[in-house]
Amino acid sequence: MSSVTAGHVPPTTHDHDHDHAHHGPEKGWRRWVFATNHKDIGTMYLVFSFAMLLEGGLLALLLRTELFAPGLQFFRPELFNQFTTMHGLIMIFGSIMPAFVGFANWMIPLQIGASDMAFARMNNFSFWLLPIGAILFTMSFFVPGGANAAGWTMYAPLSLQMGPGMDFTIFAVHILGASSIMGAINIIVTVLNMRAPGMTLFKMPLFCWTWLITAYLLLAIMPVLAAAVTMLLTDRHFGTAFFNAAAGGDPVLYQHIFWFFGHPEVYVMILPAFGIISSVVPAFSRKPLFGYASMVYATAAIAILSFLVWAHHMFATGMGTTSQLYFMYATMLISIPTGVKVFNWVATMWRGSLTFETPMLFAIGFIFVFTIGGFTGLIVAVAPIDIQVHDTYYIIAHFHYVMVAGSLFGMYSGAYYWLPKWTGVMYDEKLGKWHFWSSMISFNITFFPMHFLGLAGMPRRYADYAAQFTDFNMVATIGAFWFGLSQLIFLWLVIKASRKVGTPAAAQSWEGATGLEWSVPSPAPFHTFVDPPVVK
Amino acid sequence: MMKVKGVLGLCALFFSGAAFAQMVDMPGGPRVNQLNLTRGVTQISREISDLHWLLLVICALIFIGVFGVMFYSILMHRKSKGAVAAKFHEHVGVEIAWTVIPFLIIISMAIPATRAVVAMKDTTSADVTVLVTGYQWKWGYEYLDGPAQGVKFLANLSTPRDQIEGAAPKSDTYLMETDRHLVVPVDKKVRVVLTANDVIHSWMVPDFGVKQDAMPGVLRDTWFRAEKAGIYRGQCAELCGKDHAFMPIVVEVMEQADYEQWATEQQQAMQAAADDPTKTYELAELMERGQKVYAATCIACHQANGQGMPPTFPPLDGDEAFVLAPMKNQIDIVLNGRPGTAMAPFRDLLNDVEIAAVITYTRHAWGNKGRGADPIVQPSDVTAQR
């Protein structure tokens, strides 16, 4: 890839007479409600997901408040369980997944030289489903019995005991799943059919590749999740007994179905971040990405393996020796393609000409902390160790290193990288650096001690804990508030940039950036590549 | 650092009322600020600890290697230092190397891990078998063989409520203490068979290297051989509802002779407490027992004063239809419940002595005073209607 340039951007011609081709955005609310423009929809996705990040983050701070000291101080355990559950659901389905779709909406057409996404109206629909899901999630706190408190995994039979809040969750998951499926279809069709002439698949920026593979993952797994929660729904209300052993069902079946969705889902939330990092690291190393082809193959390998390892979430259910060994070996294998990616990024930086603007800081931060999460992933892949740390804070530490330091830092890296293209001004670099360092330090203060808590045996989803665990919990809570408040720096920075406060950005906003998106002006005009560029 | 600790300590005092500075390691539980896995009292838990060290060291070495290279780049290949970017972007040899070498490293991890998995899964040739049942929110234990065969009991959290609410200082075993302990002999292979009554729970004891889900309608087993007598603690490790954090596990490992003596005492106590449904009981015996059964089973709906909460929960005081009528219908409704109402069948939950006692109690309590037909119901009457 990477040395792709627009050989010839034909001047936009105004001589066709169909009236809808080149007008600007609608005025007022109609621009957003009836949006079909990929950039507007991308913006809405990103704003929505940041709002959900704040909501999910607020829930996290509430539960960290209760966990500051042993004993029950602020919240009853039943409410605490709602916080942990809804924190997970909102962050995953409300924040991380929509945010990546927002990046895809904005950047994939710009990166492949397409004029828009393939299905503009479906794009609108898949966005506007999200607020409905978010409202259902949020409203469920106020129904009798409160929100779903069975964990984001919603294991039967506990989820069968829940009140109507559980039905809100099920319905929201259906709606958000439909939105994801439509988003995935749109991305696949756009990438496969709408690339500019000369933009072969193996010339695409890696972000398009990782999203193409992610979209296939989504298509495969979201129906599985829909099936799982539908079975919960019929078990709850319509007399079926899929998960009730007393009536011939099997509670373990739920976990198999859920994790068949759940494990690839982990990669849905990280592969697009790999794509972003693979754009940012070369740009600020002023050197082409090392091992482009092996990056593509590694991504595909991770995606395929992700379907073959689901039961490593279930070692403690007590499966047979051979299946436990199989799932252990298969899981350990994932570290190989993941390792390849990390090695490639480091090799890209090697003998580059490095500068450290905020996107690069977040990219390096991503590689650093994501690798820690990867190592703990390898450690918990080993079944005997997993038996000790399963369902303890070690797991919490592990997946927050992957999801926060991985997905979220990856997205911040991408946001800072493309913000000049989106807003037309260079963001406040000083604030960006503050945001990075503050987030990086407070993230580690929050989550690193959780490794110790988990190794010492503190179970997760506990509203109260043995007093011996107090110190690390206090440190984690202090870190969590610091981390949460740090994100407001980003909010302020984006507000400033969107109000065009800052130096105007050039089309080529970064010296070392490559790709078609840098051939259009900053901010990117409402319509771009109406006539496809020719890629050399 | 001391200052930070001091501030944290003050906060802890403020919030929990606990004597923070005096916190000591929990006997058989977590140490204060424990950093690594518990190196417990079974071969398995030590193997897991060794495996974890092995992986930790390998990961740390790779981490230092990879990030050594990266930070060298960050320091030396800066544009501000005049670094000019090289042009290379692939190298087949290197790429094959960093695919194959990790594969070999993984195999070196997988071999000891496989041995541990096989050992952990071998639940054969057990000396003692215990059935563990998870309830919301307590554990039930039943001995299936050995000198304690037939002994069964429930183990509840014994931490007082005021410690949880912050009204009293927290003990060293806060939240990890129970009223009754699972007692097992030292150096014997104990097979633990698990199931659950309601939702999924998980039975975890870090000192044994044991964690196994207990699932309703499903039987799973695990095992441990504790090499040292003492008390070992764990907690429920699968989200099971509101009191998930309040159903700990305490296992007491005893010398064989002590274990046998404990088993004998338990057997004798059980025999003493056993009910004989063929015996004819005195009214006072039935009333005393019946009051207990009523308080445990009936009181939530029919209320302490027997007035119930009409219309859903009818009163028993002065009830002419059942309580003051001949005993047949009342025995029937207690045994079989009444479909379509909140009255559940109690035939599997109460034995004949308990049912006879509680019916007799209702016939004498409050204003009923034994004035109806059949004031005394004997267990044999209940047996006859089963």
Image: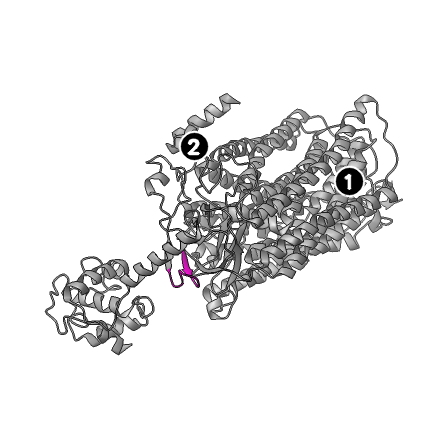
Q: Which residues make up the magenta segment?
A: B138-151
What SS does tag 2 mark? loop
Q: Nearer the viewer, residue B76 or B255?
A: B255
Is A224 one of the magenta-colored residues? no
Residue drawn 57% across and 32% down? Answer: A445
Question: What percent of the width, then of the height, locates residue A243?
Answer: 51, 64
- Where is residue A52 shown, x and y percent of the image? 56, 43
| Residue type at the position of mark 1 | Phe
Residue B365 appears anywhere in the view: yes
Which residue lies at the image location 44% right of the left edge and 33% below the top edge?
B24
**Along the horizontal axis of the image, is B299 left or right of A299?**
left
Question: How far from the left and from the top, in percent, is residue A388?
Answer: 56, 48
- The chain containing the residue under callout 1 comes to A
Residue A43 shows up from this direction? no
Question: Image quarter for residue A254?
Answer: bottom right
How many C-alpha atoms fall within 10 Å of the one at disc 1: few (<14), some, or many (≥20)?
many
Where on the picture, by quarter, is residue A350? top right
Colour mapping used in the image: one colour
On residue B62, which mark appears? none
In the image, A300: left or right of A386?
right
Front-lying residue, A491 or A459: A459
Residue beneath disc 2: B23
* Position of residue A466 measured from the top left corner of the image (x, y, whole percent): 44, 40
- Residue under label 1, please give it: A343
Q: Residue furthest bottom?
A: B384
How far apart in space, not on screen, are marks 1 and 2 (Cα)? 45 Å
